[in-house]
Amino acid sequence: MTRQRWTSRAVFILAALGSAVGLGNLWRFPYLAGKYGGGAFLIPYLIALVLVGVPMLILELAVGQKMQQGAVGSYTKLHPRFVGLGILALISSFIIVSYYAVVMAWSLVYLLASLKMNWSGDAEGYFYQEVLQTSNGIEQLGGINLSIFLSLLFVWFSVYFCVWQGTKSVGKVVKYSVPLPVILMSLLLIRAVTLPGFLQGWEMYLQPNWVALLNPEVWTAACSQIFYSLSLAFGIMVAYGSYKDRDDDITQDAWITALLDSGTSIFAGFVVFGVLGYMAWKIGTPLKDLAASGPGLAFVVFPEAISLMPLSKIFSILFFLMLFLLGIDSAFSMVAALNAAIADKYKHISLAQISLGFCLLLAIAGAIYTTRAGLYFLDLVDHFVTSYNLLLIGICQSILVGWVYGAEKMRRYINQVSHWQIGKWWNIAIKYIIPLALVTLLVTQFIQDIKTPYEGYPTWALGIGWTIALLPLLIFLWLLLKDKNKIISIEEQ
Ligand code: TRP
């Protein structure tokens, strides 16, 4: 059986870009920029893009394209002892996408509620008490919240129909689902710049505070944002690369994807701060009290700001539709990565069946986040997966390709097929810069989490977090150190 292919190069780029551009561009980047030095933040951000993001994206695309397998198969082909690396990446993906879809489910709930918009005046109470009905602490589960759970089922239903035919169905969907949210973002931008106050918002977003660059935290934030935003370390880009021909271009595709992704983030910053500027003007609150990230921005501050605008219902619908569309390509890219790993190994099961299995499993796994304690679990799991699993995988990938397989060997392959040649700097980035940067991030995070337990959660809850961070790692190490012959026989089964 021949491997699936993207229908065109543009479709591949759209799919990779769709995975990269997600909620992170809208609710993480602008906030980080506002917090860490405004316009000055662009410097560490762009440096991290060039030295960490692009080289790693090139690496992942090259590994998938050369080996023509999903993450598990590809990394095993690079070295049989690294069979656990792909598994580690996919387990982490599974965990991330299980809650990412819940955020999309909230967006749908809000999309319907936009017709009434009864959050105006108390967006915070509306979000926590009415929509999520959040309990007082993580220990009070309080049962499943039915409307969110039903909405979650709808999300998985939609994801299923995006991936069930692999590159064929993904190819059809991304032509709309990738440009559309950017168009919606532009409409929101036009709305913002036709209202007073937006310039003050932009000023806060862009005014450079050069001193911030002396703070190491700014550099680590830039680096992890790049990593997260490009959907690296989760086996996604490896799987997407594996559906390209062995002699397709790699370098240009990676640059195009990375630059468009960062461009979208910077653009989203204008939208977010433009709207916040208007809100600050309208209610007379200092801008810096409004700046928020994560759910607080998308489901409290933004809805409130929109409710103050003329034509608020229309813009509210556009905004939540945009959130949903931003999320969906990232969500299904993850399922596509999982599918690839299973389809490589069990050739007799159809893609439709595998997709169905994963979507059902993920809907069930997501149920915990639809309980009244869901928000706490989401926050906790997100913290551990993005702080530890992501970095550990990144480090292992650069060791595997840089040191075990050989950066130079991989670079020769990349240059053979690409229009743009990459210099020896790529080897240095893969072998030294990326592992060093990621180890620094990991150690800083670890020290911080040991000093102050994350958000003061109870010990059992933090235990779950640490298990999520460490268990996949232990599986990886166990497979790495196990008898090599056994590993090869597993692979041949
Ligand atoms: N790139 C996504 C964003 O910016 C975040 C992301 C990374 C993600 N890996 C993921 C989302 C896996 C879903 C699944 O929002």
Image: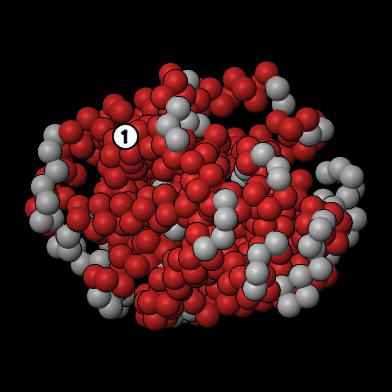
Q: Residue at x 49, y 77 (%)?
A: 162
Q: Residue at x 78, y 75 (%)?
A: 116
* Residue 54 found in image quarter: top left
**Dot 1 beta carbon under 8 Å from ligand 1:** no
**Residue 433: percent from left, percent from top:** 31, 28
Quarter of the figure with the C terminus: bottom left
**Residue 280: percent from left, percent from top:** 65, 47
Query: Considering only vertical position in the picture, is 109 above or below 462?
Result: below
Q: Is residue 175 left or right of residue 305?
A: left
Which residue is identified by label 1?
47
Q: Amino acid at mark 1?
A: Ile
Q: Is residue 150 left or right of residue 413?
A: right
Q: Residues within 10 Å of mark 1 (few under 14, many from 20)?
A: some
Q: Nearer the viewer, residue 15 or 299?
A: 299
Does residue 296 appear anywhere in the picture?
A: yes
Q: Residue at x 66, y 44 (%)?
A: 290
* Residue 106 found in image quarter: bottom right
Q: Residue at x 50, y 31 (%)?
A: 36
Does residue 205 appear anywhere in the picture?
A: no
Quarter of the figure with the N terminus: bottom left
**Residue 270: percent from left, percent from top:** 47, 52
Q: Is residue 355 left or right of residue 172?
A: right
Query: Considering only vertical position in the picture, is 388 above or below 341?
Result: above
Query: Considering only vertical position in the picture, is 197 above or below 469?
Result: below
How many marks on residues?
A: 1
What kind of element bears circle 1? Answer: helix
Q: Nearer the viewer, residue 96 or 83?
A: 96
